[in-house]
Image (cartoon, rainbow, N blue to C red):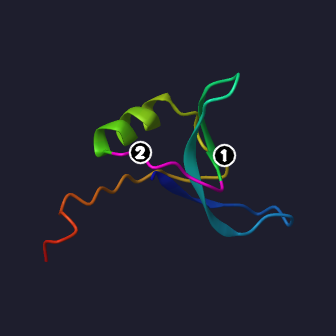
Amino acid sequence: MVRINISSNNENQEKESYSYLRHSCGPQQGFFWDIYGDDMQSVELAVLALHQAPYPTYSGPIIYKMNLKPKGDK
């Protein structure tokens, strides 16, 4: 799942929240930012999706973080 921290000064929106990257399989296929995210299956597919996705609105500088340690390792 790819998520980005978004912030807004708009009174009708939350000040701090997250936006998740999704893929549409409908008539206008492609990536978009939404409140629900898709499982990208691997780091490589997530990076490819970020490359094809539009720039998210209401976001500041983007910092990419990847956990390269398997879940079982301590």
Return the mark for residue 3.
none
Asked if the magenta segment contains residue 37, the reply would be yes
When the figure is inspected, residue 8 is found, relative to residue 2, above or below; the finding is: below
The part of the image, by quadrant, that contains residue 10 is bottom right
Image location (x, y in percent) of residue 31: 57, 34
Q: Nearer the viewer, residue 69 or 60?
A: 69
Residue 40 bears which disc, if any?
Answer: 2
Circle 2 Cα neighbour tier, 10 Å, few/some/many (<14 / 14–19 / ≥20):
some
Query: Would residue 33 appear left or right of 51 to someone viewing this image?
Result: right
Mark 1 vs mark 2, foreground winner is 2
Q: Mark 2: which amino acid?
A: Met
Image location (x, y in percent) of residue 34:
65, 49
Query: Magenta span covers which residues?
Result: 35-41
Disc 1 residue type (three-letter): Thr
- Closer to us: 25 or 22: 25
SS of the residue at dot 1?
Answer: loop
Residue extending farthest to the bottom is: 74
Residue shown at 51% from the left, 48% from the top? 38
Q: Is residue 32 above or below residue 62?
A: above
Q: Position of residue 50 (x, y in %)?
A: 45, 37
In this figure, which residue is indicated by the disc labeled 1?
A: 57
